[in-house]
Amino acid sequence: MTWSFARARQAAAEVRAAPLGSQAVATMRPRGGVGLVRSRAPLSVLLFVAARDGLVTEQDNGGYAVLQRPAASPPIRSGGFQLRLLRWLDRRWDFVLFGGPPLLGLVAGAVAAPFAATRVLGLVAATAAALWVCAFLCGTLAWQLLWVAGLGASRGQRRAAESLAACHWSVRLVHQRDPDRIDDLMRLLTERLADLVRADLQASAGNKARIGRVEVTETLVVLTDGISTQAARTLIAESLRAVPHYPAGGDVTVLASPGRLDRAPAWPVEGGGFLLLYLTALTLAIAVCARFVADAEARACAPASCAGRPVTYPSALRFLLQRLLLTDPPGLSPGTTQAVVLGWLVSVAAVVLVGVAFVAARQEIARNRETNAWYDEAITGVTEMARVLILVVTPGERDAVLGAVREHTGRDAVTDQAGERTIYTLGSVAGTELMLVQAGEQGTMSAAGMFATARDAIRHCRPDYVILTGICFGLRPEEEQRAGDIVIARRIQNVDHRKVTGDDGQTVIYRGVNVGCSPGLLDRFQACEPTWSGARVHVGTVLTWNTLVSSERAVGRLRRDFPDAIAGEMECAGVYEAATLDDKPDWIMVKAISDWGYRKTDGDQQLAAQNAAGFVIHVIAAGALRRRRNKAAR
């Protein structure tokens, strides 16, 4: 997506007019180490460049958010000269304002000094350059003294937030006046992040490889002060995508990665910006002061001999550089008070440099430790959180799960459409992360069936546990089975694969798999049965096939051929086959009886779907699935 410059100016004006627009603009354009100027270009220029670089995510109602790459990312060099120049100005705006005017003053002074008619103008230009540098040095010192003093915990937290944002992909500006569109904007942001990361990988590979599906595990850091409305700030902090355990009400909200993060990433050592800025300022000050020393010494010794005095610019520069070591160069010493004072000021600046280096290093180390501790604690909570993928087929089954989870979380689900299937992010219940996927058709064989759905969803979500829930038909009504009763599959028997022999075709040999569900999951569900006060629970063998049964005769044959079977359904074989691929998550089927396989009606389907979903969430809410599977078992 690209913006014209007119659209960028309009977007900048919209943010400024927002209730918290001034804070948002200041976050997008923070003050640099100098403290007197902003570190980024004007907002309209910044937005224009970001849009051209694909970092702006826009919605159809004008809401948008701006991504920013980590500080360690290589610079973008594509585009024409104008775009490259704007990028350079954007990233070096404070240094341009700091070094540009004094550099122009020095050039003007050097050009005007040789001519008597313009010598005064040259002196004025050089003096203005020196005053400019002095003003920035004083501003830098005052700004950093405020930082060192701390001025309360909030300033330290803001610095930590900036450090966190610099190490990760971040969002420094969010503008969306409609609260109902915030979740959609967060979804677009995470999808855009994944696209950019994949594009970077493909660009680094060039023509040597083709990057296919890549699981992006980068977290996204949203700076709270960069959000232009209070409603949006609250909703983003409470978003289901927000990483739990991070300090509530803090200066950042960390959005979970599109892919699954197995461990907290290693932190790069960063910082030292103030020290570099101080060195740059000291270098410019010496360059300007050398001109004053040379002019003062030349005027004082003329027309007598000037031997041993810094009367030329190179000699004056050598004198001031030597003063950094608190000594004069051999055979060179000034004779004017002005030169002596400037020399001693340079020496004082050199002594201060030692203190600046010590304080900067100490503050950066402390800041990095504090920031890393916050982030590591939050991300460790995410990496240790078990993930459950719930699979359903019908809209009624889907709505039953959404309703059961909503009763515990009080939140509506958020959709994720970055993968092959729509993923419903449900939030966490009892420290367990829940996701829901609905198959497009009953059965397992079609592209929209359960096998393909489960395979794609497992690859995208990488769950620890997979639970198939919904409705089934009962096989033992005479054994106290009732409509709405819950069925847990101890084993499944696939009756699709079979051999028919005999002239009458009545001899059937079943060749489908007969396999038990994951023992650990079966144990957890059975252990939670005594605390369940809802419908009765039955555990046993469940028949699965790609045939929709609505025949009393067919059901009778199934009961005769499989005397230990308690229920039948159409999707569990597909879940089992998908769960044997890739990460091999634990799996189980938990459904409820809606009919008996003949004379079907829809009367009990809603009851059955609600009972099955309620029991699944009851087990999860009890903390039975809080722990992740042992990675070594995968």
Image: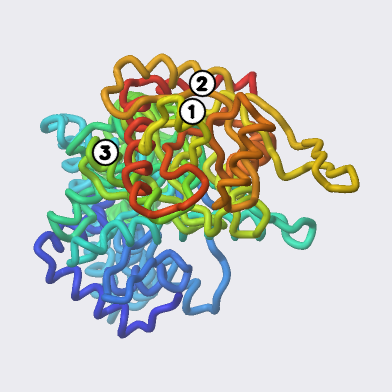
Q: Nearer the viewer, residue 72 or 243?
A: 243
State if disc 1 and disc 3 touch (CB < 8 Å): no
**Crowd rating for badge 3 (residues with CA inside 10 Å; few <14, some 14–19, many 20+):** some
- The numbered dot on residue 237 is none
Q: Splitting the image into 4 quarters, where does residue 372 fall?
A: top left
The image quarter containing residue 288 is bottom left
Q: Helix or strand or loop: what does disc 2 sit on? A: helix
Q: From the viewer's side, name the closer residue of 35 and 185.
A: 185
Q: Looking at the image, is 113 positioned above or below residue 603? A: below
* Secondary structure state at the residue bearing disc 1: strand
Circle 1 is placed at which residue position? 488
On the image, the x and y values in percent for residue 69 come to 45, 53
Residue placed most toward the observer, 134 or 324: 134
**In what quadrant of the picture does the N terminus appear?**
bottom left
Disc 2: which residue: 522
Give the spatial CA distance, label 2 vs label 1. Answer: 8 Å
Task: Write the residue at 59% across / 49% down.
Answer: 450
Q: Mark 1 and mark 2 in contact (Cβ < 8 Å)? A: yes
C-alpha distance separating marks 3 and 1:
53 Å
459 and 481: which one is in front? 481
Q: Is residue 193 above or below residue 215?
A: below
Pair 2/3: label in front: 2
Q: Tell which circle, 3 or 1, labels the residue nearer the N-terminal end.
A: 3
Using the rendered image of the protein, determine whether residue 444 is visible from the camera's viewpoint: yes
Q: Residue 99: percent from the left, percent from the top?
A: 34, 60
Q: Which residue carries the number 3 mark?
A: 159
In front: label 3 or label 1: 1
